[in-house]
Amino acid sequence: DEMSEEWALIALSLLRYTDDTRLCGVYNSKAIAEVLSQMSRVHTVEFRFPSLRYPHGIPWQVLKRILALPSLQELSVDMHRFAPMLSDTEQELTLDFPINLTSFSHTISDYHRRPVVFPTERQALELVIKSSSSSLRRLTMAMELAPLDLLHNGADWSNLRELHLRGQY
């Protein structure tokens, strides 16, 4: 519709580090890998930029590098899309290592505008949640993106103490 086209033109005019509005080009997986390799004791990573007008997408390669930290216990992602698409160098979403998160939070503060669900984003969320379900104690999700079928069956929630579902719908 006309409003979507207008938003797309505005978003494209604001791009500086990427050529796609769904992925933030500032997050460089090689640079993040180098920095994280020197932070072997990090147990909490948070992405939160409340002043952004539109959510940025974090590439799957960046998220994988963070999730691979052996000491990582808490991951919080707000006002960012969670791997909304694969980059040109990625073929599929995979995790070939265990995840032992005790807390995972993914919220998007602007869902009152218009919820958009990307298939790759939902797959990435399902993969992370299912891989860490037995160790999670706290799970916070945007209702519009929460894989409710996964919450219902196929996962071990023996350690879950808090479940927060947030959203407009």
Image (cartoon, rainbow, N blue to C red):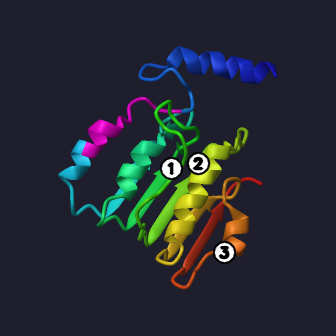
Mark 1 = which residue?
Answer: 78
Q: Are marks 1 and 2 in contact (CB under 8 Å)?
A: yes
Q: N-terminal of the two: label 1 or label 3?
A: 1
The kind of residue on which mark 1 rests is: Asp
Mark 2: give few (<14), some (14-19) or many (20+) Cα within 10 Å. many
The kind of residue on which mark 3 rests is: Gly
Picture residue at 34% right of the left edge, 64% below the top: 72
Picture residue at 21% right of the left edge, 55% below the top: 39
Q: Which mark is residue 45?
A: none
Q: Is residue 38 above or below residue 165?
A: above
Picture residue at 69% right of the left edge, 58% below the top: 143
Relative to 141, is 40 on the left or the right? Answer: left
State how far apart marks 1 and 3 are (Cα). 26 Å
Q: Residue 159, how many percent across, how many down?
A: 51, 83
The quarter of the picture where residue 118 lies is top right
Q: N-terminal of the two: label 1 or label 2?
A: 1
Residue range of the region highlighted in magenta in the rendering: 23-33
Mark 3 = which residue?
Answer: 154
The quarter of the picture where residue 116 lies is top right
State how far apart marks 2 and 3 are (Cα). 26 Å
Picture residue at 47% right of the left edge, 40% below the top: 59
Mark 3: give few (<14), some (14-19) or many (20+) Cα within 10 Å. few
Disc 3 element: loop
